[in-house]
Amino acid sequence: MMETADSIKQYGVLVPAIARPDPEGGYELVAGHRRHRASELAEKETMPVIVRDLDDDAATIIMVDSNLQRESLLPSERAFAYKMKLDAMKRQAGRPSKENVSQVGTQKRSDQLLAEQVGQSRNQIQRYIRLTELIPELMDMVDEKKIALNPAYELSFLKKEEQVDLLDAMDSEQATPSLSQAQRLKKYSQEGHLTLDMMRVIMGEEKKSDLDRVTFTSDTLRKYFPKSYTPQRMQETIIQAAGGMAEKASERPGTMKGAAYERYFSP
């Protein structure tokens, strides 16, 4: 925000904000809230604004378009933005919400139009919108990249009370669902067989990525290396030593002892 304020202080607001008349008097800012805040920080008394007569749906579409132009959007922000704009587009077009097909066969579905406008596939638009079915706690975990988008999409099909139970299972097992785990949770939910105990069993499974990962804390390794060694150098030394051990094993089966150990782990 301060970077924008500095730019406005030097060059002014280059793109006017958009407002509409407020029935109760004055004006309602539709697009340009960040520019308005930055102008205040830049101690500007005025900023350029275009006033338009807009109904609620038109105002929503302009507001969402303005937000979508931001460089960084959280998944939750993108999901709700797509949903708000698509709902407004459907109301504007007067199309049935279920099929959303125009009475004129040559016109496109609203979700297809939205996809073209934002440069996404129609399927990706619907997957983002589906995320709005997540409870806030799970949505926060998506924003924090603790749960990936694909598993989150599958979890959005769980009932709200099941999503609450899933938080319990994730906490007790200290794990977040992979895509395959999320798909199974969705399957059991749709079959009416998903219970908290089943969630705990699924979340307690070791993922393939966990089986392939070996983790050491810095404190565990520090006692085997000089104090001057950085974590990166410790890692390189371990990899070098492991390679030497593998080479020795291929020549003469057995374990590395004594001088060989000193050779590969000495600074």
Image: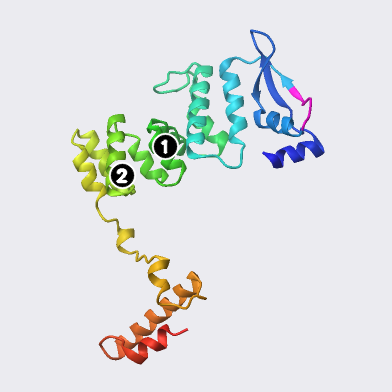
Disc 2 element: helix
Measured as percent of width and height from the top left, residue 176 is found at 34, 47
Q: Residues in magenta?
A: 43-49
Specify the amino acid type for callout 1: Met
Looking at this view, is 51 or 41 the one in front? 41
| Residues packed near mark 1 inside 10 Å, few (<14), some (14 to 19) or many (20 plus) | many
Tell me, yes or no, if residue 149 can be seen here. yes
Q: Is residue 228 magenta?
A: no
> Is 120 displayed left or right of 239 in the figure?
right
Residue drawn at point x = 76 percent, y = 40 percent: 7
Check disc 2 and report the residue beneath it: 171
Measured as percent of width and height from the top left, residue 180 is found at 30, 48
Foreground mark, 2 or 1? 2
Check disc 1 and report the residue beneath it: 139
Looking at this view, is 265 or 90 the one in front? 265
Tell me, yes or no, if residue 121 can be seen here. no
Q: Look at the picture and state if 232 lies above or below 81.
A: below
Specify the amino acid type for callout 2: Asp
Residue drawn at point x = 39 percent, y = 36 percent: 137
Q: CA distance from mark 2 to mark 1?
A: 16 Å
